Amino acid sequence: MHTHIIPKNLPNWTDKFGYGDFIFLEHNDNGTADMMQGGKFFRRIEENCWDEKMRITDYEKYHTQVQVVCTIPVMFSYWAKVSDCVELSMFLNDHIADLVARYPKNYIGLATIPMQDTEAAIKELERAKSIGHVGIQIGSNINDKNLSEDEFFPIFEACERLGMAVMIHPWQMMGFDSMKKYWLPWLVGMPAETSRAACSLIFGGILERLPNLRVCFSHAGGSFLPTLGRVEHGFNCRPDLVAIDNHINPREYVGKFWVDCITHDIDALKYILNLQGSKRVCLGSDYPFPLGDLEIGKFIEDSDLSKEVQQNIFSHSTLEWLNLDEKSFL
Ligand SMILES: [Zn+2]
């Protein structure tokens, strides 16, 4: 339920719009492509980032038939002018909708929406649903604003009303500029970002006010669940700082939201399963990126977890999170 895809060819939005560090793909002779960010090299990617058939074959090796696809977080472009971000989001959402329409048994789509503008975000959310998306992927903060800010509430409200699932993906990592060495934004910043998002949605009362909103946090919820004891203790010992918008203990929400299983560590996964229950932990891979679980859950298949728990992780949790029926994929 957590894989990234990008169209093989992107418009050169920096040229078109006349500003900004929009992503553009420069293809190389050996089949790779360089993601250029406003003219500067960002990351080299391979054909499995866009080749829909190659992705299906890669997944078959690990007995997995269906991929939930969403864009690469660097594409969010929440910093752009609203109308430009709308155009970019529509382009990416149309690409995924077309893919899902052509391979309905192999792909499920999550859209991206211009979170920097509440009205435009809801409009694209509605359009995304109408073309076959079953949810959205959003960042862990929006231009450094926490997800508890009032301007985002109508978007979450619309997601609940429309039955669109929400996947929270860390991006625009805190501390990025001061810890570039050792890949720390990915290794330290991302787990912290996901916890920031979870704490914001809980303490801000968003999950409390929208009990039917189906939210899934990436990378097993980042550092949120591993530091739950600390978070709860903070809530209890300093309610004047923490319990100002929601008086419910944060532990009450555990098992109400979903997380993926990307831990690379069976003991860590068992800890997560103990808290969440197996119906709230989904098979995620972060394919096709190297920090992901590119053996698509092999560490779970090789574990001593019961077949029932494995089956919940491998499909039932995701189907419930996205409100989909298994029969559609058989
Ligand atoms: Zn990811």
Image: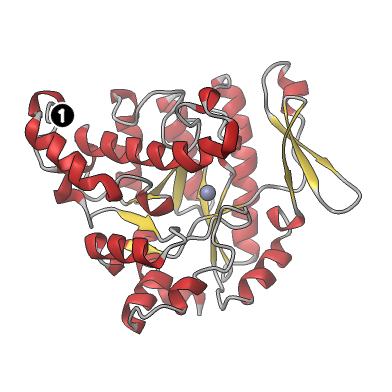
Residue picked out by circle 1: 242
**Colour theme:** secondary structure
Residue situated furthest top in the rendering: 18
- Percent across and percent down for residue 142 are 44, 28
- Percent across and percent down for residue 35 are 73, 38
Q: Residue at x 67, y 64 (%)?
A: 55
Residue situated furthest bottom in the rendering: 307
Tell me the crowding category of disc 1: few under 14, some 14 to 19, or many 20 or more residues within 10 angstroms, Cα based: some
- Give the answer, above or below, for where 143 lies relative to 248: above
- Percent across and percent down for residue 318 are 40, 64
Residue 211 shown left or right of residue 282 in the figure: left
* Secondary structure type for disc 1: helix
Residue 328 shown left or right of residue 224 in the figure: right
Residue situated furthest right in the rendering: 29
Residue 303, picture quadrant: bottom left
- Percent across and percent down for residue 159 are 35, 43
Residue 182, picture quadrant: top right
Residue situated furthest front in the rendering: 182
Q: Residue at x 33, y 40 (%)?
A: 195
Q: How many marks?
A: 1
Residue 88 shown left or right of residue 285 in the figure: right
Residue 60, picture quadrant: bottom right
Is the CB of mark 1 within 8 Å of ligand 1?
no
Q: Residue at x 68, y 28 (%)?
A: 22
In depth, the one of 127 and 169 nearer the eye is 169
Q: Which residue type does callout 1 highlight?
A: Val
